[in-house]
Amino acid sequence: MSDATETHCPYCALQCGMGLSPADGPVPVAVVERPGFPVNRGALCGKGANAAAVLAPGARLTTPLVRVGGALRPAGWDEALGRIAEALGATAAAHGRDAVGVFGGGGLTNEKAYLLGKFARVVLGTSAIDYNGRFCMSSAAAAGIRAFGLDRGLPFPLDDIPRAGCVVLVGANPAETMPPFVRYLRELRDNGGTLIVVDPRRTRTAELADLHLAPRPGTDLALALGLLHLVIADGRTDEAFIAERTTGWPETRAAAMAHWPEHVEAVTGVPLPRLRAAAGLFCAAPTAMVLTARGPEQQAKGTDTVNAWINLCLATGNAGRPYAGYGCLTGQGNGQGGREHGQKADQLPGYRKLDDPAARAHVAAVWGVDPGSLPGPGRSAYELLDSLGTEVRALLLMGSNPVVSAPGSTHIGSRLRALDFLAVSDVVLSETAELADVVLPVTQWAEETGTLTNLEGRVVLRRRAVDAPEGVRSDLEVLHALADRLGHGAGFPTDPEQAFEELRRASAGGPADYAGISYRRIAAEDGVFWPCPDEDHPGTPRLFLDRFATPDGRARFVPVQHRPPAEEPDEQYPVRLTTGRVLAQYQSGAQTRRVAALNAAAPGPYVELHPVLAERLGIVDGERVAVVSRRGRTVTPARLTTAIRPDTVFMPFHWPGEGNANRHTNPALDPVSRMPEFKACAVRLEPL
């Protein structure tokens, strides 16, 4: 590591530490281990180990592109930026400020997310801004705020997980999505702890479990209510904790008791003995945790589902003390920081609410503008994308690929095509960038410095290790140049540390307070946990030990009732489809699909189904089949496995074209978080 730049992986929210050493050849650096960083202790998955491959010239954009006569052609930066500024300004003048939209990404650094939100609200004056993190952990965030008064993915450090007596992992498959995390589960088992995995598939993660529960997709809420019913019936609640540190228990208790275990067995398909075993293991442990991921969260009732699991923790006293509690396994690289500093439709920096007058006054003072000039809350991500071409006429998009990743992706592709103007700032020519009027080539992780906030609330520093190719600029330079052309260049620094210093001031006093965090401290301390209100503050690895972040300091039980998915199987579409990720690919695949080693491991889409279902439908392993829903049709090879429920099929969502799984996913929205229902819809399979 002596000649290596210490930095972090560009992919998931673990933000694993790695080193980059100079190398000869088309890829200018080589990935090396960084064993001193505590999150991964040097371990990397295949995606991280091959991360440098996307730096190769042939894998990425190196010149701006503009659309002329229906085709994209190379252009200079002045022409490209001029076209964007002119289009955004003309659209606002003709149709109003909210006719101009901004769509961000959960992989953007804190500095980029902060200035993108500022750009939308100060330069464009638009409320039409959201980001793809809405599709990731918004339900967990909403549930955490309802129960605890604060959302941070994990309210405790990762090192606490192996010290718990029992961990329930709900709808998460970290053995494929974030493999270095698995060491925490192995250490849990080595320490005598118990692992329960809830997933309709017997995944690589479920193989590690002491107990695997396989509910039907979309029934996690009923499962959590059934477990709480059993805990109450067996007299295993922590009445002292409930009395001293919570409110709302009587209503929540009544809601849980209405969900009889036999009914829950019928709804979920999980046998009653396994339900009883899970409740027994959870209550027998001296401390216990529930960790959720996209499975229960990406539902039209995802917020209520997460609150049901939080209720289980609160009822048993497993919150607000060491080695216990509820946490969300954030997915995207900066999914946590990306939602804290202004990309989200209803938020200002520091996790402040946009409709709070005091929050508006504080941030406006930092920005040097009148609080009344700031627009109000806007549409959520899917609603924003659905409005393209009608209410939103021009869009600036940074670091996202909704043509592949959005629910009902065929429809969203048509909305993008309906825009008067689309500008995309990205590292590669993604499927969304191919639709743009202007494409800007920007620096990527190894070519720029910036902070990110990992799933445990640790703010880390990703350092520049290599110069970007000629013709490539940073997103901060893009925002500065556009702001300057639109009359606001002074408030948009191109230096990331300068941007972070302003972010510190804007976040000061907010729920996500970064005021005491600096580049110097991050470098010296392997990251700093927020909240950290001043430079003498040590940071906060563990939240809620003394009080919860509610006005009275008590956690809130939230009474919830099970309801079925927005779309249930019927005669025409008799099978449940759920979606997810595979080990070698990441999110929409825009970057990983350009890496030969990763494509060799996971070359394309497929539909996974049980042999019993395959025999009934006359489907043979490896043959191409049509998957048909109310929203679209895909064609993909069949993969037979006994690791999935016979009434359920699974598709990974990393690929575009005829195998794109998100053609099927249901855009029915959670009423609180506005999360679409990615994880449950109805389909039929047709042999070809």
Image (cartoon, helix red, strand yellow):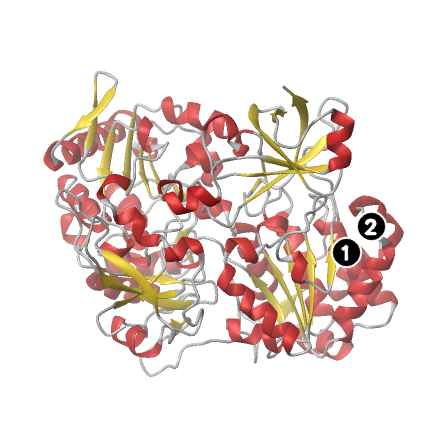
Q: Alpha-carbon neighbours of circle 2 within 10 Å: few (<14), some, or many (≥20)?
A: many
Depth order, front residue of 557/71: 71
Q: Quadrant of the N terminus?
A: bottom left
Q: Which residue does the image show at 76% across and 50% down from the upper left?
A: 222
Depth order, front residue of 324/238: 324
What secondary structure is marked by label 1?
helix
**Residue 317 found in image quarter:** bottom right
> Where is 212 relative to 429, above or below?
below
Q: Position of residue 390 (x, y in %)?
A: 40, 23
In the picture provided, is 46 more to the left or to the right than 324? left
Q: Check disc 2 and give the amino acid type.
A: Val
What secondary structure is marked by label 2?
helix
Q: Check disc 1 and give the amino acid type.
A: Leu
Q: Position of residue 27 (x, y in %)?
A: 24, 51
Q: Which residue is mark 2?
A: 264
Q: Which mark is residue 633?
A: none
Q: Alpha-carbon neighbours of circle 1 within 10 Å: few (<14), some, or many (≥20)?
A: many
In the picture provided, is 514 more to the left or to the right than 229? left
Q: Is residue 319 visible?
A: no
Q: Which residue is mark 1?
A: 225
Q: Position of residue 546 (x, y in %)?
A: 56, 80
Lower position in the chain sequence, tag 1 or tag 2: 1
